[in-house]
Image (cartoon, rainbow, N blue to C red):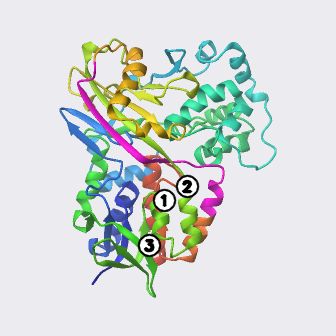
Amino acid sequence: MTNDVEVAVVGAGVSGLCAATLLAESLGDEAVLVLDASDVAGGYARTDADDGFLCDRGPNGFLDKEPLMFMWINKLGIYEQLVRANKAAERRFLLKNNRLIQMRPPPGFLLSPLLSVKGRARLLCEPLIKRKPNNKPETIWEFAARRIGPEAADTLVGAMVSGVFGGDAKKLSLEHCFPRMAEMEREHGGLVRAMFAKKRGGSGGSAMGPGGALMSFAGGIGTLTDAAMGRISNRVRLRHRAQKISQTKTGYRISVQGKPDVVARFVVLALPAHAAGALVADLDVEMGSALGSIPHAPMAVLCTGYREEDVGRDMRGFGFLAPRNQDKRALGCLWSSSIFPSTAPEGWVLLRTMYGGYTDPQALKLSDEELLGYLANEIHPLMKIERTPEFVRIYRHPVGIPQYMLNHGRILETLEAAEQRHPGLVLAGNAYRGVSLNDCVRSGFRASERLLEQRV
């Protein structure tokens, strides 16, 4: 027995659900079938509502600078449920010598104790630094140390990289993690020159990315995947673990554990890279090897709730990041109920603290009690909290955020060549061209567009 369908989407995370809803809209629901090994759709983009708190298991929002995200939101009919981050959340902090110091833009930054006088002086020399003379791949840290100095690279850029990627700035590729930075140097010779040029041209953003306001939904980020699931729920098969993909004369055959095979003309492979690699290992050894070589940073997310009167710190802000040179195991702490007040009941505070990452994979082996011990020792003193949290939810993601290493360009070339060798098979997800929710949605649109082009 087999299930014959025109398009099979393997993986019901954001990218898979996005591609599936777009393809169903173009081809009709019956043309699309989604397979996922889990018993719940949505991947990491899910929200748990519990005791009046909203806990996002993975990402907690997206920037309002991606038109495709809003196009998909409108298609799903959930635009009216969007919420914008609290204005006070624009205040962001960095941990330095057991103090939370607000990060300020120039010229205020020049008086900040985040960097030594020498470090600030070196940063001011950025306009005088010549552009890189060759196209040799460069890590984020190498770029930052070259342009703004090693101290700023460690303290400022390193913390940002661990916060966004859970990664190590000395390992990750600048070109693939922050392509805007590389572009600014290529086009304008440096970051300061580029920012002045963009101001003259009236465009926003910064060296790190496009900027913009953080957005979510009144019911948490899971609203997005719940709405997508609601649109095509009759075409989603949960607890269907794909085991192998093989080529047929007219398309592909997907072997499903304990279930009938699925035969499809087209396949969108929207799984984490290592899982996708295992599926295609027999179909294309080179493709499977390339997928399997993309590492992921494991992450543990602690959502903890407190009564307002038990938190002594001024909670106006987004939260803080902890540079790796500050002797703290936590990567950072977001003040969720300050960013999106609907995430906690009135009179309560919700914090979201991250542990693990590429530099500390052993953190996921810690027990819940051990993680809460680190929270009490590292985070509570900074937040002036003397009581244990009255609400606790801990999420562990062993295969967390993809890491774009220096060889990521070669990996993408290998995967693009494999897609060419296997018409009708398309990769989607956050392991390739960006890790954010916006990137996942762009990947879903890319997959659907490529298959529709091949279908003609």
* Mark 2–mark 1 CB contact (< 8 Å): yes
Q: Residues within 10 Å of mark 3 (few under 14, many from 20)?
A: some
Residue at numbered disc 1: 274
Task: Return the residue at label 2.
Answer: 294
Q: Position of residue 155 (x, y in %)?
A: 60, 25
Relative to 134, 48 lies left or right: left
Name the quadrant containing residue 19: bottom left
Pointers 3 and 2 in contact (CB under 8 A)? no
Q: Which mark is residue 89?
A: none
Tell me if 48 is positioned left or right of 144 in this view: left
Part of the protein shown in magenta: 388-413
Is residue 61 covered in magenta?
no
Residue at x 66% of width, y 36% of height: 141
Dot 2 or dot 1, earlier in sequence: 1
> What amino acid type is highlighted by mark number 3?
Leu
Q: Is 188 located above or below residue 153 in the figure?
A: below
- 87 or 141: nearer the viewer: 141
